[in-house]
Image (cartoon, rainbow, N blue to C red):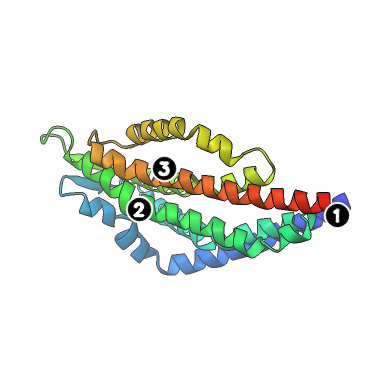
Amino acid sequence: MSFLDHLEELRWRLIWSLIAFVVAAIVTAFFSDFLVNQVLIRPLKESGPNIHLQNLVPYGQISLYLQVIVFAAFVLAFPFLVWQIWQFVEPGLHETEKAASRFIIFFISICFFSGIAFGYFVFLPISLKFFAGFGSELIANNIAIQDYISFFMGTLLTTGLVFELPFVSYVLSKIGLLTPAFMRFYRRHAVVALLIIAAIVTPSTDMVTQAVIAIPMIVLYEISIYISAAVQKKRNKKMMEEGVA
């Protein structure tokens, strides 16, 4: 394909992605009340009676609903968006790599949704309960809705991206920049680093709470080692077959 053909291909991928996002936004807009009341605000309600949302500007709730619709549409359309990116990259790959396209898309999506679920069901409740119980009882915890939605979306996007570690390991191992021997050698260093990260991002000083955050990341690191080893084994086998041929 020529350079102009690549641009045309990219243009159509962007158009299809935009269409998918708009369709997803229409769907999420239909359920916007449920998403705001039962998904967005629910973790805050369950954190305790000492924390409340507050709208500080006339257009605050309109902005809140729009942000919820856009964020939910992105999450809903995520597998299709990944598929469009893969369809743009796929023509430059080998036949054996193309065969793995469905697995790749499924793998990326599962990692992302697992991170979103971890952020929503584990990290957010722990953080909000700590914030609700910390400090003086004479000070009301009235949170601006814009600050809350920023914290909510930032948390879920961060955990969603962190859970892509196995996929990143797969890609780096595929191009030869990462080996299982390297990851095993620095396993102890990685565990210490992950524990430090868990202590930083976890608002509570409780060791159990920090462990709840750190253990999934350590498990992800171990899974990444296994994935890297599988990729290297496949590469070595292919090199041996090419050498024999």
Residue that numbered label 2 is attached to: 120
Q: CA distance from mark 2 to mark 3?
A: 19 Å
Answer few, some or many: residues within 10 Å of disc 2's Cα (few below 14, many 20 plus, some between 14 and 19). many
Specify the amino acid type for callout 3.
Answer: Ile
Front residue of 45/123: it is 123
Specify the amino acid type for callout 1.
Answer: Ala
Left or right of 136 in this view: 103:
right
Name the quadrant containing residue 199.
top left
Residue that numbered label 3 is attached to: 218
Lower position in the chain sequence, tag 1 or tag 3? 3
Residue that numbered label 1 is attached to: 245
| Residue 53 percent coordinates (x, y) | 26, 48
Lower position in the chain sequence, tag 1 or tag 2? 2
The quarter of the image holding the N terminus is bottom right
Disc 2 secondary structure class: helix
Lower position in the chain sequence, tag 2 or tag 3? 2
